């Protein structure tokens, strides 16, 4: 392959996006066919480029070190392959799920353009094109969310502002790093996070974790789960943005900066990861809508990735990166399963569902595998990556972070026991009558779910394949002498204390679910109520549900308050001065002048003489 081949992952989906946009809505299946064909070609190209792994395209552009540089190496090739795979599955799924949508032209255009921009961001080896592609995703993010319900416009604005704030931080960090190193080429930068470089690290980290959806930059995701199309949730937050955000975070900690074990920055990342795990999973536990429940888990699982990478320990970093691809698999599968349920029943409210495993067995099977994978059940892929993160957290010397991760494991499994019990395995609810008999979804909907479920099994049982093929080469050259990067020896072992604690956590979750189920009158969607109503925790839940911890909503309140203060404290007083004081003063002087102008010549002559006398006196005073 020639270096120019690196342009195809960007140009091909972008061209397909333009074609999709210009095809009239009344033309059936051509748009879907072109989109599916383009995504299939992208998947083939992803495999071909992964086989090559090393390509560079250097195009002089604006001078001053601003060049259009693209670079393919092992890590970027791996992410590119993952992006192309998810694009193909989402496009196949969308041919049925999005059929008949009034803005179908925009939908495919946004999806394909998102793929082009994401590929460009992954391949970019210069900060300027990286920022261009990265920021372009803000536009497609906004557009895709607006394709949902009428309320989606507010959510789209919220997502745009929060993501834009994080992106601004990243740009500021890039500017500081440029000033420190004198170059914009990523592959030429490797600095210690000291002095001003610490600020650059933190700002760029905010950009990365904001894209991935970590706390406190996550609050638009649960709103989008309800307002945006479910295909968007499976495509952007579950797959593309997680892969991009964690990819950049790993590049920041491994390549651009040298993050050291036990350093202050390492501790900051682990704290963010642990807080994201626990707080988000606690919110997921009490949700009564399947899509909203999944959205909080999409946030919580990011915490594991940040925690693993933040340990700065090989097994933890590898676990965080492996969890990135595992999460994209099972979370996309879970959202697609929710979409399948919604397609046939018209709802994702837990209390209106139940018993669907009998009529939708393939969807139920795919959901079950993905739910067990995200819960860290042996021998699926989630178990492997979580165990690696647990080991990394313990090796960091801070046991509290491993405890936080285990707490997250308990409530993750409890959440999915509740969800699976409510939707598929509990009794059929009578609250949601459906006119036609419920049956399995069409093949284009079911096939992507089953493929992702199969990958969850494969990446767990045959974990040596993804670990040695995808993950371990990323860490080559980033480990100290004497450290091992062979993680396959114990990755599936359940005969060690760490795995034993993880299994105990799953048993606790099982007990918690059935306890809540019985306390809730054997209604699965109420299984989390004992935790919800627990003293003190109940108050915190109330605050969370009232958006007290929502960065965006609190920002809106502050800005509204500031607007009131400025309006009443500055704007209105200024208006009062101009409208009242100045006007009344002017009217008073005008009245005096009107009274003085009587029209008598003698009066005017007296004023003139008086003025001359005053002028003469002033001149005389100045001369002296």
Image (cartoon, rainbow, N blue to C red):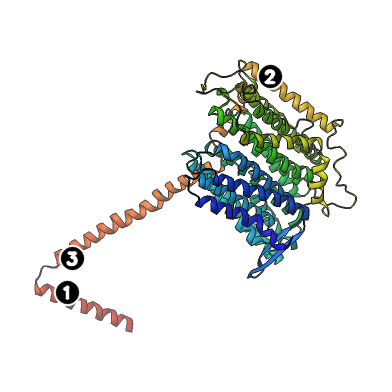
Q: Is residue 420 left or right of residue 348?
A: right
Residue 533: quadrant of the picture = top right
Q: Nearer the viewer, residue 359 or 80?
A: 359
Spatial CA distance of label 2 from label 1 is 101 Å
Q: Residues within 10 Å of mark 3 (few under 14, many from 20)?
A: few
**Residue 277, above or below 265:** above
**Image quarter of the C terminus:** bottom left
Horizontal and vertical percent position of residue 52: 77, 56
Query: Which disc number belongs to residue 593?
Result: 3
Instruction: Indicate which disc, 2 or 1, sits on the residue closer to the N terminus.
Output: 2
Q: Residues within 10 Å of mark 1 (few under 14, many from 20)?
A: few
**Residue 6, above or below 93:** below
Q: Are marks 3 and 2 in contact (CB under 8 Å)?
A: no
At 67% across and 67% down in the image, what residue appears? 59
**Residue 492, above or below 126:** above
Camera-near label (1 vs 3) is: 3
**Residue 105, above or below 421:** below
Q: Nearer the viewer, residue 478 or 360?
A: 360
Horizontal and vertical percent position of residue 591: 18, 61
Horizontal and vertical percent position of residue 528: 63, 24
Q: Is residue 348 left or right of residue 365?
A: left
Horizontal and vertical percent position of residue 311: 77, 45
Residue pointed to by mark 1 = 607
From this viewpoint, is residue 483 visible?
yes
Under tag 1, what secondary structure? helix
Query: Which disc number belongs to residue 514?
Result: 2
Q: Nearer the viewer, residue 42 or 352?
A: 42
């Amino acid at each position: 392959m020639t270096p120019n081949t690196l342009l195809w992952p960007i140009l091909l989906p972008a061209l397909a996006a333009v074609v999709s946009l210009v095809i009239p809505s009344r033309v059936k299946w051509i748009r879907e066919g072109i989109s599916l064909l383009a995504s299939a070609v992208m998947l083939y190209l992803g495999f071909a480029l992964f086989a090559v792994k090393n390509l560079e395209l250097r195009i002089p552009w604006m001078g001053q070190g601003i060049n259009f540089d693209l670079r393919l190496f092992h890590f970027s090739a791996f992410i590119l392959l993952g992006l192309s795979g998810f694009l193909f599955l989402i496009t196949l799924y969308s041919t049925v799920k999005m059929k008949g949508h009034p803005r179908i032209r925009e939908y495919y255009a946004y999806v394909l353009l998102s793929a082009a921009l994401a590929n460009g961001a992954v391949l970019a080896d210069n900060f300027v094109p990286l920022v261009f592609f990265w920021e372009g995703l803000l536009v497609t993010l906004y557009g895709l969310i607006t394709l949902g319900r009428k309320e989606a416009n507010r959510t789209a604005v919220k997502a745009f502002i929060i993501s834009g704030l994080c992106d601004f931080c990243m740009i500021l960090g890039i500017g500081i790093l440029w000033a420190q190193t004198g170059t914009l080429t990523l592959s030429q930068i490797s600095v210690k996070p000291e002095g001003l470089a610490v600020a650059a690290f933190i700002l760029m980290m905010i950009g990365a974790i904001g894209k991935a959806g970590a706390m406190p930059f996550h609050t638009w995701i649960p709103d989008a789960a309800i307002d945006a199309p479910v295909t968007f949730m499976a495509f952007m937050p579950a797959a593309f943005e997680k892969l991009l955000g964690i990819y950049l975070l790993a590049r920041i900690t491994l390549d651009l900066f040298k993050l050291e074990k036990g350093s202050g920055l390492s501790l900051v990342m682990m704290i963010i990861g642990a807080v994201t795990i626990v707080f988000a999973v606690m919110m997921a536990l009490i949700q009564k809508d399947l899509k909203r429940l999944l959205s909080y888990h999409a946030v919580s699982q990011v915490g594991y990735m940040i925690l693993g990478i933040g340990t700065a320990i090989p097994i933890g970093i590898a676990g965080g990166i492996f969890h990135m691809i595992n999460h994209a698999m099972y979370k996309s599968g879970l959202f697609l399963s929710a979409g399948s349920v919604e397609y046939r029943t018209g709802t994702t409210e837990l209390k209106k569902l139940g018993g669907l495993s009998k009529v939708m067995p393939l969807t139920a099977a795919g959901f079950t595998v993905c739910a067990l994978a995200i819960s860290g059940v042996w021998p699926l892929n989630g178990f492997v990556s979580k165990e690696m993160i647990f080991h990394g957290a313990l090796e960091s010397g801070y046991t509290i972070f491993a405890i936080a991760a285990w707490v997250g494991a308990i409530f993750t499994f409890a959440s999915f026991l509740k969800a699976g019990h409510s939707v598929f395995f509990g009794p059929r609810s009578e609250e949601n009558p459906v006119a036609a008999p419920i049956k399995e979804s069409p093949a284009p909907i079911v096939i992507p779910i089953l493929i992702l479920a199969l990958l969850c099994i494969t990446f767990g049982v045959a974990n040596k394949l993804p670990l040695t093929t995808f993950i371990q080469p990323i860490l080559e050259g980033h480990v100290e002498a004497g450290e091992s990067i062979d993680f396959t020896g114990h990755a599936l072992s359940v005969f060690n204390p760490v795995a034993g604690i993880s299994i105990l956590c799953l048993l606790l979750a099982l007990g918690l679910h059935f306890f809540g189920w019985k306390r809730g009158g054997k209604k699965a969607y109420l299984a989390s109520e004992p935790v919800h109503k627990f003293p003190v925790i109940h108050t915190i839940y109330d605050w969370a549900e009232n958006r007290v911890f929502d960065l965006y909503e609190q920002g809106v309140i502050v800005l509204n308050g500031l607007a009131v203060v400025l309006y009443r404290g500055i704007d209105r007083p200024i208006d009062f001065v101009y409208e009242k004081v100045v006007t009344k003063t002017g009217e008073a002087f005008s009245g005096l002048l009107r009274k003085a102008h009587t029209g008598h010549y003698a009066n005017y002559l007296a004023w003139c003489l008086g003025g001359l006398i005053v002028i003469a006196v002033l001149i005389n005073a100045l001369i002296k």
